[in-house]
Amino acid sequence: MTLLAACGAAEDRAGSQTPAPATGAASAGPVAKSGPSTRATPDPSAPAVHPVATAKEPEHHVHAGDMAVALTFDDGPSPTYTPQVLSILHQYNVTATFFMIGTNIERHPEVLRQVLAAGHLVGNHTWSHPDLRALDPAKVREEIERTGDIITRVGRGAPPILFRAPYGNFTGTAMAVSASLGMHPVAWSVDPRDWSRPGAQAIVDGVLGAVRTEAIVLNHDGALLDPGQTEVGGPADRSETVAALRTYLPRLIDAGYEFTVPDPAR
């Protein structure tokens, strides 16, 4: 619960930048808490990782022309809420980006595969959603690398190309590590603070009141649960986000926005 509250506070801090508009398109049981790295021996048949230049700062906007917007969802996959989000996106033929936590992928690999099968992009959101500022370089690398490995293995495809730091804390080490793993850092420009469960209408107002051309919108389709915690009725409940999406998405479409995904090429 502490993590859930802190998540939004720091995300609000890092992501409150001028927003922008855009266009439409269109991964199993409890596991132990993150311990020592369990990375497998590299598979010679796995897709190659191509390092990229280390960015000076994360991307806050997309660059896909007038009325282009990116929808992003953090902290999944969730077996309860991610499928509901996928259903709404499918209804409106919108493609989104899902920044997933490695621990949640390990618990619910089938949901990650559902996201990929629906044509959406999956990004790296670390293994256990820590504040990267508090970790030494070796632990930062483990958090990012381990998550990239499970996305690649469970998704049976290419390694993720996008990275989002928990709480928006893009440290120099995190930026360098993600670049060495071929990933580009992506933040956001519109944050309705849906994680705080302010009510569906407040989330709708937060998105519609801030969105502009080239915006990256931050929402949450999941959470990292504490032992014994459930997704429904508590701090991890994302039903307000789902209800808000069902309301604001058709309004954005009616207003002429089109949806894209963050472009690592910039």
Image (cartoon, rainbow, N blue to C red):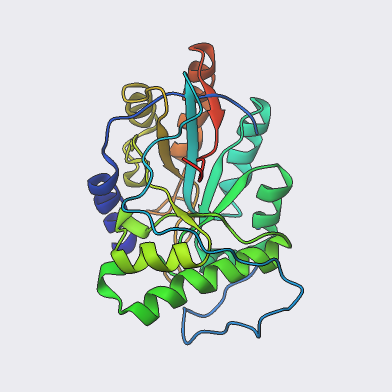
Above or below 19: residue 235: below
Left or right of 75 on screen, residue 155: right
Left or right of 114 on screen, residue 242: left
Q: Residue at x 72, y 79 (%)?
A: 43
Q: Residue at x 27, y 36 (%)?
A: 17
In this view, the residue in front, 211 or 29, is 211
The answer to whether one can see residue 170 in this image is yes
Q: Residue at x 64, y 25 (%)?
A: 92
Please identify the residue farthest to the front as the structure is shown: 53
In this view, the residue in front, 242 or 173, is 173
Above or below 245: residue 7: below
Please identify the residue farthest to the right as the structure is shown: 45
Q: Position of residue 38 (x, y in %)?
A: 56, 84
Left or right of 121 on screen, residue 3: left
Q: Position of residue 150 (x, y in %)?
A: 61, 69
Picture quarter with the N terminus: bottom left
The answer to whether one can see residue 225 in this image is no
Count the marks: how many? 0
Q: Position of residue 91 (x, y in %)?
A: 67, 27
Q: Position of residue 213 (x, y in %)?
A: 41, 22
Above or below 142: residue 265: above
Q: Residue at x 30, y 76 (%)?
A: 135
Left or right of 104 on screen, residue 13: left
